[in-house]
Image (spheres, helix red, strand yellow):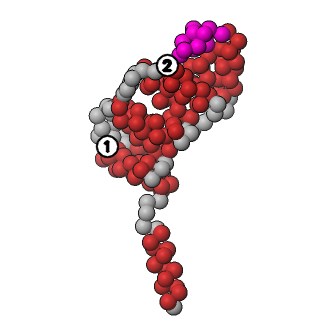
Amino acid sequence: MKRFAGLLVLGLLAGCGPDVAMELAAGKALLANAAQQPADALAAREHLQRAAEHGSAAAAFHLGLLHRRGAAGLKGDAVEARRWLRLSAEKGLADAQFMLGQMVAHGEGGPADVLQARQWFERAAEQEHPEANFELAMAYRRGDLGVQPDAAAADRYLMEAEHALKHPRTLP
């Protein structure tokens, strides 16, 4: 009986921390309903915040979007958006890498840095992110983002973008 009680206590203690997947799922579900129920947006933000603080790249991505758009009771805050997107991008989320690349390229929420922006686009493109591949194709076509014009590289990235569009992904 003592052994059972000890296992029960350990099980309860283990369950005390937030279940990151559940927090993320709840946040996303509430966000989907936020247009009909504005109060859901605030609850969604709280769930996403908890999940992101416990390492969820997807939750950090969604928080970055909320801060960038000024949604869920938040004022638009490019600095905070860039911070959350960076956390998500560093964990390898292609959508966050692409969006962070856009923000860095245009100086949203911090200094513009075309070389760093290109690196984020390249990381997203390696994961077959269509918009990142297209962004790089245009950079090589025009000679933007710190690269020299290169028609062959532009064509390669365009083909990769086309390929990626044939395999649509869902948002995290």
Mark 1 touches mark 2? (CB < 8 Å):
no
Quarter of the image holding residue 68? top left
Tag 2: Cα neighbours inside 10 Å, few (<14), some, or many (≥20)?
A: some
| Relative to 23, residue 99 above or below | above
Q: Is residue 159 magenta?
A: no
Residue pushed farthest bottom? 1
Magenta region, main secondary structure: loop
Residue found 42% across the figure and 39% down from its top: 84
Residue 124: x and y in percent read 58, 31
Label disc, if present, on residue 165 of the rendered structure: none
Residue found 63% across the figure and 33% down from its top: 127
Quarter of the image holding residue 123? top right
Residue found 61% across the figure and 23% down from its top: 133
Tag 1: Cα neighbours inside 10 Å, few (<14), some, or many (≥20)?
A: some
Q: Which residues are magenta?
A: 139-150
Assign a secondary structure to mark 2: helix
Label disc, if present, on residue 114 of the rendered structure: 2
Q: Which residue was labeled with disc 1?
A: 38
Assign a secondary structure to mark 1: helix
